[in-house]
Structures are given as C-alpha cells and as structure tokens.
Image: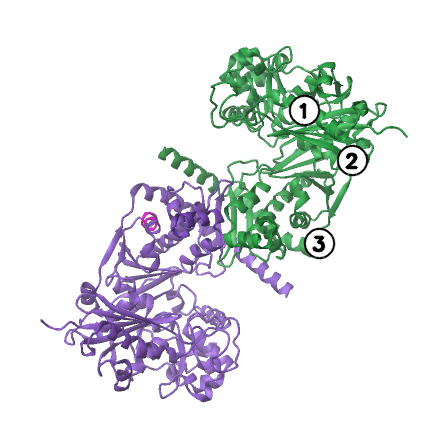
Chain colours: A purple, B green
C-alpha cells in the first residue's frame, strides 16, 4: 500500500495563525496547531518604539506571520509523526485586505531598521480604519467619473481596501510610499517568503484592489484624478503577475524548507482569503450554491456563470473563489456579535441564576426558551443593523431596531427576534441575488455559528425556504487552504488536478436543515414586514438613523 | 386660641383604602392608615361560593369598602388623639369606573343572599375587561349615528366605562339587570352609605357615564339602537341627581357615625376619582395648568375655560375636576410600568452585582449612569407604546419601539431612551392641547414617579420646555378628598367655602424643575424625530404593529 499523502493549510486570523495537517485522500484533519502573534493587533504603540498610534489604526508585525510557519508547521508534523516527505503541498488563507509596503529585496519595510519607527512601514490590518477620508474622496471621484468598477462593488470602495490604504501612506508618509518597491497583500507576501516569487492571487486583487480580469486595475486617468502622484501606481508598485485562485505559486525554498521542517520544493498554492478558502472546504465548487461563513458576522459567497450587477454586494470577481466562475461576495456586518451584545447587555440576572442552577450556560438557556416559541408568537420584529448594513444597503450609518415590545415581552422573545432579523437580512441578500439573475438553489454554512446553534440554523432554513447543508469541518478556511495546497501539487505530485476533484474527496456535509412548511409560511408574512421597514429606514424615506448619529456626534463634540 | 379643625380624605385604590387626617388650616397631614381589602381583586372565584370567573374579569366586594371606613377612620383618630368633634368634613376618591348594581334599599345586590352567587351582582372593578364586545359594538353604533358625544372622548368609549359594563350585565345576567334599582359608581355608593342620600358626582358621570352637563346622557334613540331593552336605562336606573365636584353630598348618618367614630352630621363631600382629586391637592384650581399624576401610568388633567375638541383625549367634562371649569383628561397607558419592565427584563447581572456591591438599588444605579448622558448622546430613540397609546392616538394595539441600537449600546442608554420616550409622549399631549386652543402655561406633578426621580423630572422639563412644580404631598388623592371634605363643611362649619380657598391654605409645592436651555434645544431635534415615527406607525402609514399583533393572535390560535 502506498504511503498516505498530506497537505497543510495555514489560516491567518486576526490574533493568531492556525496550521492544519490534512490527509489528501480523505480530507481527514490529522493535526492542528495555533500560534498567537507575539505582537497581536498593534493599535496603541509600535513594538520596540515610542511611536503612538491614532485611535482608528490597526497594524501587525509581519515577522509574526513567519513565526506561524516556523513554529506551527513543525508542531503539527511532530504531533502527527508524519514524514515531511509525505507532505505534498501547502496553501494559506488570510484576513484581507491586510497589506504592507515591501522593499525591492522582498522584506517588509518595517523589517528594515531605517523605517522601523514609521507606522506606515508596518502591516495595515484589515480593520485599520484610518483611511476613511481617502475612501470617501475616492468614492466621490469615482462616482463623478462614472467609473464602471463601482458597480462591481455595490457602489462603494471600502476604507479597509488596498487603494485607500496606499493613498493614506502617500498622504501621511510620502517617504514610505517612495521607498516601497511594491504594496502587497499579506497573503501574497507570506507566500512569496516561502517561494521566493512574487505571484499575486486573483481573489484579493479582485475583491480588495479593484482589479478585473479583463479590464485590469482602474485607469491611469482615474489614479491621476485621485492624486497626480498616484498616476503610475500600477506600473510602479502593483505590477506583478496575478493568477487565478487554485494556481501554484511556486515551490518551497531551501531556506524556508529548513525553517519549517518541510522538504525543499513542496508545492505552494497562491495566497487566498479566509472566507473564500472556506467555500470549497464546504464542498461548493459549482454555481447555484451560496456559502454562509457564519460567526461574529456572515460572509456570503456564491459562484455564478456570468458577471451580473447585483445591488449592494461587496464584490464580484472572476476566478475570485474558484477558477472559471465569477465569485460573488456579500455580507452582514454583525450577526454573532448581536447575540453576544444581547447576552452581555440585556439578559436579566434571574436568567443568569437559572442557567447557573441548571448547570448550563446562558446561551443554552436562552436557546431553550426561544426554541419553544412559534414564528410570530412574540409579536416582535427587529432590523439587524447593530453594526450597520453591509449588504444590500452598504451603509455603516444604519442602526438596530426592535419593534413590537409590550410589558409582557420576555428576554427570549427579544433574543429570537434578533436571530430572526439576521435571517431576514440573509434572505434579503438571497432575494437580491436571485432577482439580479444569479441563481441560488441551496445554502451551505460553515463557521462557529453554524455548528452550535440548531434553532438558529432551522430559522435560517425556514426564513429562506431553502435547505442548508452544514460543513463537517470546524476549520473550513484552513481545510480549504490545504485543499488548494493539494491542487498546487497536482495529481502527479500526489494531490489533485482540480479543486473539484479535491472537494469530492476531501469534504463532506455533516447535517442538513430542511425548511418546515408551516414556518416558511409564517415567516413569509414577517419577512414582508421586515422588508417594508428595511426599505423605509434604509432607502431614504426616513433617514432618522443618520440624523440620530449626527446628533450624537455633535453632542460629543459639544461636550468635548 | 381656637381648637384646630380637621378633615378626612379617603383614597380607595385597587388593593386597599387609605384614610388620611388633615389639618384644615394648613393641610398638614396628621395621621394615615391603610386598610387592605379582605377580598382584594376578585378575578378567579367569588368569595364564599364556587363560582369561577372568566380570565378578563375583575370584581370587588363592596363590604370591603365599608371596612375601610369602620377600621381606617377610628385608627387615624386614635393615632392622632384628635377629638371627633374637631373633624368637620370628609371626602372620598375612588378608582373609576368601578361600578355596581344597587337594590332599592341601597344595598349592593351582592349583599343580598338571593344574588350572592351571581358574579354580575358584585362590583365590577375599573380593570374588568370583559365588556370589550359591548364597547366595540357601542362605538360602532355611535359612530354610525354620528353621536356628538364621541368627540368628547377622543372618538372612543372604553370597555372599562359604565355603559359597556351595564350592557354586559344585561346580556349575560338579565335577571340582575332587572333586579337592579340603579347602577352606581362605587364612589357614589360609598358616599350614599355615609349620608343616606343618592347624590351622584359630575366627575364620574362625565368621564365614565357619557353624561354632559348641558346635554345629559345619550338619547333614548341611541340606547334603543344599542338594545331595545336599554331604551329606558336612564329614567329607570340612572335617574339620580348629579352635582358638581366640590358639592356637599349630605351629612353623616347616626349609624355610620357610630361605626366610624365620627360625630353625627359631619359634612360629606360628593364622591370623586383619585387622579381628579389630586388636582387641587397639587395646588391647581385654575386654567392653564396641567397636572400629571405620575406612577405606573400618567393621567394628565387640565382645566380650561371653554369646551374644545382635542384630538385623542380621554374626556372633557364641565365641573369634572373643579366646578366652573371644563376638566380635560388625557393619559399615557404605561410609564413607570415600562421602567419596571426594563429593570426586571433587561438589566444584566453585572449591573445588579455592581448595585449590590455599592449598597444601592438597581434603579438608583441605572439613574446615576443615565444621568451622565447628554440628550442625544446615546443615538437611541424609542416609542413609548409598551401598553399601547391612550392619548393622542387612542390605540391599544400599538407597541413599543427602540431604534438606534449598536453593538456599543449600554443598558443605561436604553433606560434613558425609554424615559425620554415617555416625556415625548407627554409633550405630544401638551402640544395637542395647545394646538387645539387649550392653553398650558405650567406643568404640575404628583404621584410616586414625580417624588423619587430627579433625572426623569428634569428630562420632562427639558422635553416640554416648561417648568414643572412638584406637589409637597405624597398622597395627593387623599389630601384632595380631605380638601373637598373641608369645602363640604363650608367656612361656617370651620372649613372653606371654595376649593380655591382650600388650595391656597392646604397645599404647597416642594420643588420646581426648570428647563435647561441647551437641553431644550437638543430635545427639540429628538422630539421632531419622535413625531415622525409616532405618525408613521400611529396614524396608518405603516400598520405593522397591528399586523404583528394579528399574526401573534393567529399563531396562538393555531397552536391551541
């Protein structure tokens, strides 16, 4: 019998990186290791310096990413006793847009002593929000020029994305902009550290850097209109090859092979993004299936056969998720976060005591009580905008609503109404896609929320009227990255030639929620009411939420 | 020096009666005693019988009312060592409409063995809600006949009022209807027990029995249209003299004088209603001043010089509060009740623990935190309809709304938003009166909520932009009743000839809240937003609240 082959997936999160060793033939997860970033999220002071950061900054130390390779990979090899000779490939996925300025020799600028004290030389994490002015200005100029790319991003480029972040560097630290040979996504930079080759992936290029497979980056004229100094940004600092997700980026260099304890020449996949890597790990590699990556927020990913304009989506990118398909992304900016807020801020002490007395956690206690309610029985309806609305309204200034409260309203009724509201938010996204001609036959779910919450998942099935299949894996991003590692190796190298083949062997569904017809009928009525409120508060009929935020802002300024 | 004179006020609440002994010259409250009703609120089973009641019934035993006279009055005399010779008058106030069928000899029908097993022979308490069908039917017929009286009651007769309650008796127990020589408000019946004379007061007649000083009761034709058997209701069963509030009803009979320990012939005022009796006790006896009786709900009472039609008020009655004025009544159906709901259902356990550790109650803890916020600082806005809207929308099917929630929203912010919402509700009432030409120069407040909550009262002053004067007395209904007792005695009898004189001597203001100009300006903006939502949800643009209640009802039926 031939020896088992393995692939490694490395999932770079916000606080740590996770290395996962997977059996290529079956997808069995053999060993995993989590390495916390020594410097975590840098939002107060640069490590080893006195440089203070402003409040909406969020940086990271790229050295921490390499530590995940150097510590995590040997750890899983040791734990599993797998021979490095049998590790055929490796893929990574990352938060995005997490970007950095890079020197000609491939080092991050912040790794060069000359620049270490300049915060703009460090990695800007996805949630670095200090480029909002640049984003606002970019959106204004793009709209006034009728730039076609806007429609691909729901009409708005986020301050979290690459071009605003680069522009902030130019505005605030032109010497860093000048010194940078290139700006890279961290996922591409880490991949380059392993292979020695600067190959960019189509996913972050498409979703975060306004790149399009046919049209490329925005025009020179557009960049010139932003700032004359940006005119040649693409040729000068973004001019590396961009290849589809699923491609091989290169092979492990001798230096890194030694540090990681792997064999020289191990196949390395091009970099990827966490939620996007989770799609094939959920078993979805063809059109008509929407994957919900469910946690503090929900990321909705869908494959389509054509490029359509869909109202308020986050982006559509050819080869963005699976090569050969248009990858659509949409999202809800707070889901699990809302329930956590509720559990921390709104659950009365007698419920906490009851849970304690029964030896269950408060979440379980609320779920039990809420599960006894029928749809509509509480008389409550909520709008799930506790952290604004990402899709389909693309408006961070919207806020949460609870309607229908009476003196008899109970905590579990509010809890259930909040869950239902997030399900209505997902249904609004599903409906918007299907109305735009992008079909959705089935839903798939992965991520923490989909694994632990039966009632929630049943509500999502009932509200959307669709079956929802739950991924077996608890770490779909890392599994997906490992699958792409196996594809980078190819069938000849002991892996697979396509991600379809990999998905067929390496993934499975652990459970399916099926809509209950009576509940579907009841939720149709409630969703109709949600839609009326959604449009009334979200589409300009009553901008009370924005005016309240403005009043709030003025109050604080006045007070300061 | 002449001996001090005293008057007694007796306040009949829902669970107990309170007797208060007051110094006539100064209003000083000398002694008080609370007597609980032995049978309390009868809502499950008739005392001494096996007769079960349906769920929306609420009865009382009239014998319990007499016990308050027999026990409470001797108790305050004993405690104060006041000589009964020096007690010059007595007045009572009551919940309303609290009504009963009365035999020709003045006994309640339920005091006669023949009728004791029939629940319709007992007192129907104000919150007996089993006459809703009759009320709905009455309103429909009144509207179709364009009955002028509807406008005096905000367009709707409540199921709690006299005519629906009488009609329920006729429908369900015609033998009781037949046996009743008369139907009386409990306040008039208890007064009659003391004086031996059947004299009705203009307050309950006007606010609860559709009586008008000029037009009298509704017409024979109207009653005939309701039910041919009701055609002669007024002549046959409501045909007693009705006199203005402030009149003398009669003098204490020898039998009752003996039972109560008072002197024979003590002056007895005509019966009154609790919130209405509180008005002169707050010092208000002229036009332009609105009294807010603030507790679980708010009752707004206002004197005017003319009869105006005001949108959605509860009633306007000539001589209804103070003789010579038109008494206007409006209300908010839940105020303190909302805060209690919040404290019980929505305050997280770490707040409860903090309050405990600091040795303060949770209410105090929330108030402290909420008081640190500026108007508008939370970004929240609420609609105070947790128990429907009494004025100005007169709609029990409306429900509460909280808007503006984010992941950073704190419990004290919600708490303050709820308080502000009730203040906006009061301001809507103030505005509706003034827009209708009934002027309001100042606000006065009495009742528990006005005594304990500095922040709340300041918010009310800031939202309404008006000074609010707080009554000194903690038991304004009983004090008001005692004041009317002193007026019944007259100046010659050691009291006062008018309630104006009594108010000048017997009441005072303990504190005044003055609007803070910056806050007034801020609340104007928030109130403008409240008004938009109030009209959107309350005046038919989006009847989502009613549809949710309908869905809720159907769900329960389906489930049952």
| Residue annotated with mark 3 | B516
Q: Is residue B308 visible?
A: no
Mark 3 or mark 2: whose residue is earlier in sequence:
2
Is the C-beta separation of discs 1 and 2 under 8 Å? Answer: no
* Dot 3 alpha-carbon crowd within 10 angstroms: few under 14, some 14 to 19, many 20 or more: some
Mark 3 or mark 1: whose residue is earlier in sequence:
1
Mark 1 or mark 2: whose residue is earlier in sequence:
2
Task: Give the quadrant of the N terminus of chain B.
Answer: top right
| Residue annotated with mark 1 | B71
Q: Is residue A310 visible?
A: yes
Front label number (3 vs 2): 2
**Residue A266 shown left or right of residue A293 in the figure:** left
The vertical placement of B443 against B187, above or below, is below
Q: For numbered disc 2, what is the local secondary structure?
A: loop
* Dot 1 alpha-carbon crowd within 10 angstroms: few under 14, some 14 to 19, many 20 or more: some
| Residue annotated with mark 2 | B28
Q: For numbered disc 1, what is the local secondary structure?
A: helix
Q: Chain for mark 3?
A: B
Q: CA distance from mark 3 to mark 2?
A: 33 Å
Looking at the picture, how far across and down is residue B493, in whole percent? 83, 23
Front label number (1 vs 2): 1
Q: What is the chief secondary structure element of the magenta stretch?
A: helix
For residue A181: magenta? no
């Amino acid at each position: 019998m031939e020896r088992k082959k393995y692939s490694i997936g490395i999932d770079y999160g916000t606080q740590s990186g996770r290395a996962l060793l997977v059996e290529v033939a079956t997808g069995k997860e053999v060993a995993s290791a989590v390495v916390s970033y020594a410097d975590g999220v840098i939002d107060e002071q640069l490590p080893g310096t006195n440089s203070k950061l402003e409040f909406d900054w969020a940086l990271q130390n790229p050295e921490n990413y390499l530590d995940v390779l150097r510590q995590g990979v040997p750890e899983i090899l040791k734990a599993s006793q797998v021979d490095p000779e049998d590790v055929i490939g490796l893929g990574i996925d990352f938060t995005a847009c997490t970007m950095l300025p890079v020197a000609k020799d491939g080092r991050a600028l912040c790794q060069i002593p000359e620049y270490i004290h300049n915060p703009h030389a460090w990695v800007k994490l996805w949630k670095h929000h200090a480029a909002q002015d640049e984003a606002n200005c970019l959106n204004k100029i793009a709209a006034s020029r009728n730039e076609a790319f806007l429609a691909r991003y729901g009409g708005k480029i986020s301050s979290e994305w690459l071009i605003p972040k680069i522009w902030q560097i130019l505005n605030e630290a032109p010497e860093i902009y000048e010194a940078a040979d290139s700006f890279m996504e961290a996922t591409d930079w880490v991949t380059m550290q392993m292979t020695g080759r600067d190959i960019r992936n189509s996913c972050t290029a498409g979703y975060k850097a306004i790149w399009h497979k046919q049209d490329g980056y925005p025009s020179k004229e557009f960049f010139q209109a932003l700032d004359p100094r940006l005119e040649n940004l693409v040729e000068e600092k973004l001019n590396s090859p961009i290849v589809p997700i699923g491609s091989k980026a290169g092979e492990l260099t001798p230096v890194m092979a030694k540090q990681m304890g792997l064999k020289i020449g191990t196949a390395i996949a091009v970099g990827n993004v966490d939620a996007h890597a989770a799609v094939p790990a959920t078993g979805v590699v063809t059109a008509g299936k929407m994957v919900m990556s469910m946690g503090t927020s929900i990321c909705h990913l869908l494959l389509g056969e054509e490029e359509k304009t869909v109202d308020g989506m986050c982006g559509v990118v050819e080869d963005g998720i699976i090569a050969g398909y248009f990858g659509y992304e949409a999202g809800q900016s707070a889901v699990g976060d809302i329930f956590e807020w509720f559990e921390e801020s709104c659950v009365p002490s007698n419920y906490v005591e009851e849970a304690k007395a029964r030896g269950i956690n408060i979440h379980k206690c609320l779920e039990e009580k809420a599960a006894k309610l029928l749809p509509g029985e509480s008389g409550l309806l909520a709008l799930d905008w506790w952290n604004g609305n990402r899709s389909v309204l693309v408006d961070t200034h919207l806020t949460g609503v609870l309607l229908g409260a009476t003196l008899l309203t109970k905590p579990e009724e509010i809890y259930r109404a909040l869950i239902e509201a997030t399900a209505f938010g997902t249904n609004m996204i599903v409906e918007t896609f299907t109305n735009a001609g992008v079909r959705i036959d089935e839903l798939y779910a992965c991520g923490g929320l989909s694994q632990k919450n039966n009632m929630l998942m049943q509500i999502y099935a009932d509200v959307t009227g669709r079956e929802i299949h739950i991924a077996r894996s608890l770490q779909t991003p890392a599994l997906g990255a490992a699958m792409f590692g196996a594809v980078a190796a190819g069938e000849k190298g002991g892996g697979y030639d396509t991600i379809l083949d990999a998905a067929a062997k390496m993934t499975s569904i652990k459970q399916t929620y099926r809509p209950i017809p009576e509940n579907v009928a009841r939720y149709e009525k409630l969703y109709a009411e949600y839609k009326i409120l959604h449009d009334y508060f979200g589409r300009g009929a009553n901008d009370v939420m924005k005016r309240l935020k403005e009043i709030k802002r003025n109050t604080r300024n006045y007070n300061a």
